[in-house]
Image (cartoon, helix red, strand yellow):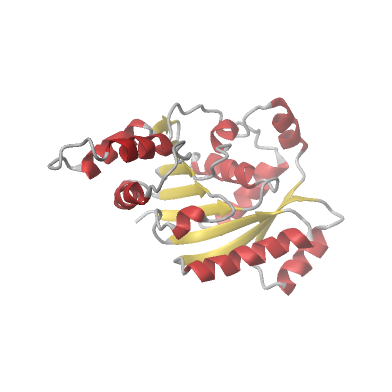
Amino acid sequence: MAKIIAVTGKGGTGKTATTSLLIRYLTKGDKIVLAVDADPDTNLPETLGCEPSKTIGDIKEFMHDERDNLPPDVNKESILEGKLYEVLEEMPGYDLLVMGRPEGSGCYCYVNNLLRGIMNKLVSNYDILIIDAEAGLEHFSRKIFRNVDDLIVVTDGSRRGLRTAERIRELVDELETDVSNIYVIANKVTDANRERISSTAEELGLELIGMVPVDEMIVERDLAGEPLFDLPDDSVAVQEIEKIAQKLGL
């Protein structure tokens, strides 16, 4: 059974950068890794340095439009599964799936139901599934992904950001989603706010698993539109993410 890790957080907190650096760490081991970009903004491929041509959203739209045109005796799940492998990007050290979103209007519940079983089957081929999730946890509420082992909430150093992490924890309980552990990573931390972040997290009952310092290398690459995947080992963010990954048992 694959270990499933989902990374969530508000825009601008460094959620996708954190996911990218966790994937970077995982590629250095012997685990078989599947990365899933489940955020409709689809920023993960750029931080990894790849450009997928199609998304699962494209497949869902195809199946939605063609469902009434397919012969009744055709196995629609097999068709969807074949299409899914068409959009699976094989990268050095990991595979990548981009969820995207369908362009058309209407209900995609039919396709989601088919996709749920196929995703569970696909995940069984991997040691680790790591998901760059949207803050609203929409994909979890649809139950497209099965039980989540570790949900990581990335936040900035503000009290408001940590409150957001608290609300995400409450949302998980409301959705009755099967999440074994919820952790918080504080990102863009400075010496001035480090102690306050730690005390606020403790006050809110949040399990703070790491604090990633402000990293000028990431700032420069973001401005230049360059991938984070090939950051050097002496990057302070890379070093902290390595410690966090080890705490997670990766």
Q: Position of residue 201 (x, y in %)?
A: 72, 67
Is residue 89 in view from this perspective?
Answer: yes
Where does the image place residue 127, in percent across and percent down from the top left? 39, 49
Say if 9 sits above or below 73 in the image: below
Residue at left offset 22%, top offset 35%: 69
- Total marks drawn? 0
Q: Is 39 on the left-hand or right-hand side of 215?
A: left
169 or 4, nearer to the observer: 169
The N terminus, quarter of image: bottom left
Res. 30 in view: no
The answer to whether 229 is drawn above or below residue 153 in the figure is above
Residue occupying image coordinates x 44% and y 55%: 4
**Residue 156, how many percent across, how many down?**
74, 53
Residue 161: % across, % down: 73, 58
Residue at x-position 55% and y-position 39% = 24
Residue placed most toward the observer, 239 or 57: 57
Residue in the picture at 59% in, 66% down: 169
Q: Residue furthest right?
A: 192
Q: Quadrant of residue 102?
A: top left
